[in-house]
Amino acid sequence: MDIAATIRRQLDRTGSTAYLKDGDWTSMPFRAVVQHLWRKKSSNFEPEISELGRVDNQYYLYIGPENHNIKALSSRASLEINGARYEFRCRDAVTVDNRVAYYTGILKKIGEDDENADG
């Protein structure tokens, strides 16, 4: 059973079209899932302490296919999906039997695409 292929098929069904950008390079479109991390304990990735009960930053969980290695990108790399841009706060490869099955990461929302700002 090829777990990476199974996960890629599920991402193709449930994910959104995404692009990785690193400097002048832009990846081919692929499907990935980005989910908002809304709980305080799992979404505070800033070193500074904010006021009690206030969380300004928007963090998301990224799940992407094994054929788009996010760990090989520079620290300036970003992800564009559904008209929004995100930067990676951390990245990891999930392996099964010493083979990458998929990539996961924590994203911070950094902006909207100008094309989609009009509506």
Image (cartoon, grey):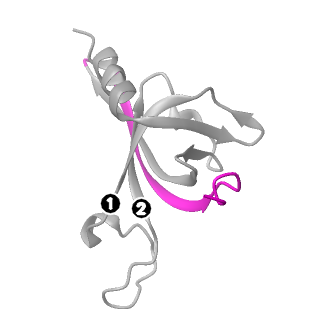
> Please, is residue 112 above or below residue 8 in the view?
below
Q: What element carries label 2?
A: strand
Residue sitting nearer the eye, 98 or 65 = 65
**Which amino acid, by three-letter code, is at mark 1?**
Leu
> For the point 58% across and 29% down, which residue is it?
29
Could you tell me if the residues under marks 2 and 1 are in contact, i.e. CB atoms within 8 Å?
A: yes
Asked whether the viewer can see residue 99, the reply is no
In-image side of 79 versus 40 (left or right): right
Residue farthest bottom in this picture: 51
Distance Cα–Cα, label 2 vs label 1:
6 Å
- In which quarter of the view is residue 36 placed? bottom left
Q: In which quarter of the image is the C terminus?
A: bottom right
Horizontal and vertical percent position of residue 98: 30, 19
Residue farthest right in this picture: 24
> Please, is residue 42 above or below residue 75 in the view?
below
User: Is 103 included in the stretch rendered in magenta?
Assistant: yes
Residue farthest front in this picture: 119
Q: Earlier in the sequence, mark 2 or mark 1?
A: 1
**Which amino acid, by three-letter code, is at mark 2?**
Tyr
Asked whether the viewer can see residue 91, the reply is yes
> For the point 68% across and 41% down, which residue is it?
22
The residue wearing badge 1 is: 37
User: Is 91 included in the stretch rendered in magenta?
Assistant: no
In-image side of 106 versus 85 (left or right): left
The residues colored magenta run 97-119
In-image side of 94 versus 106 (left or right): left
The residue wearing badge 2 is: 59
Horizontal and vertical percent position of residue 59: 42, 61
What secondary structure is the magenta-colored segment mainly?
strand
- In which quarter of the view is residue 93 placed? top left
Q: Quadrant of the N terminus?
A: top left
